């Protein structure tokens, strides 16, 4: 199994500002994933962070709004840019660390935008 | 495109009663199905995967390719089973996982 940590655990931000969320894995992984879980909703994949290449974004998500960095095999950041109240959500990172597509999840970052 | 459907947002059962959380999927290839659970104030974690054919905490799930279903079952519900349950589909070697909308299981004492 893997241990995944996220920082910050929660934050309250003002409209128009940006927040960078960090995700750290205790082992090297090829791919890391960023999800959004809006209140009462399921998890929606934002993007896949690949080490050494640009992130791959899902439909409805763009790099200008959610820039992602992946500087090495254990770390990634997701920035939520120019925030609006609609960005209030829980942001989760995950990584598969076995051959079965099993995902290990971080504890999440609860973001509130005022 | 892959899709996971969980028709029930909330399922309430009495302690000791059987539980069945429904999950149907849509995928043209060979799927890998999972059940994830999120207990109150805890992170999302894997409960079981179809490929292992295992029973975890008394829960089992059988992949039925004919009905494209992967229902989660437990013969006797316990109060500690109360949680949010997500069915998930992993497709191919890309390791991308699609989640259903989740079912909240409430076990009544």
Image: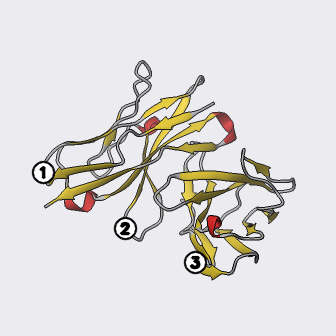
Comparing A56 with B29, the one in front is: A56
Q: Tag 1, which secondary structure?
A: loop
Task: Measure the C-alpha gap from mark 3 to mark 2.
Answer: 16 Å
Badge count: 3
Mark seen at residue A9? 3
Q: Is residue A29 left or right of residue B40?
A: right
Quarter of the picture containing the C terminus of chain B is bottom left
Q: Tag 2, which secondary structure?
A: loop
Residue under label 2: B40
Relative to B60, does residue A19 appear above or below in the rendering? below
Relative to B67, does residue A56 appear above or below in the rendering? below
* Residue found farthest to the right: A53
Residue under label 1: B16
Q: Is residue B70 left or right of residue A99?
A: left
Quarter of the picture containing the N terminus of chain B is top right
* Residue found farthest to the top: B66
């Amino acid at each position: 199994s893997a241990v995944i940590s996220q920082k910050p655990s929660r934050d309250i931000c003002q409209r128009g500002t940006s927040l960078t969320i960090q995700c750290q894995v205790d082992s090297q992984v090829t791919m890391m994933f960023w999800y959004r879980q809006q209140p009462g909703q399921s998890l929606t994949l934002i993007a896949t962070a690949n080490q050494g290449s640009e992130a791959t974004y899902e439909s409805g998500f763009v790099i200008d709004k959610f820039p992602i960095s992946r500087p090495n095999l254990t770390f990634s950041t997701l920035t939520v840019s120019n925030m609006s109240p609609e960005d209030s959500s829980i942001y989760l990172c995950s990584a598969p660390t076995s051959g079965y597509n099993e995902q290990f999840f971080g504890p999440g970052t609860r973001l509130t935008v005022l | 495109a892959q899709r996971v459907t969980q028709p029930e947002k909330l399922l309430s059962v009495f302690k000791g009663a059987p539980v069945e959380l429904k999950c149907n999927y849509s995928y043209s290839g060979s799927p890998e199905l999972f059940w994830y659970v999120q207990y109150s104030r805890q992170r999302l974690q894997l409960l079981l995967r179809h490929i292992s054919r295992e029973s975890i905490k008394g829960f089992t799930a059988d992949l039925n390719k004919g009905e494209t279903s992967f229902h989660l079952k437990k013969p006797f519900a316990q109060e500690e089973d109360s949680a949010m349950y997500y069915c998930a589909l992993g497709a191919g070697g890309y390791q991308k996982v699609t989640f259903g909308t989740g079912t909240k299981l409430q076990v009544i004492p």
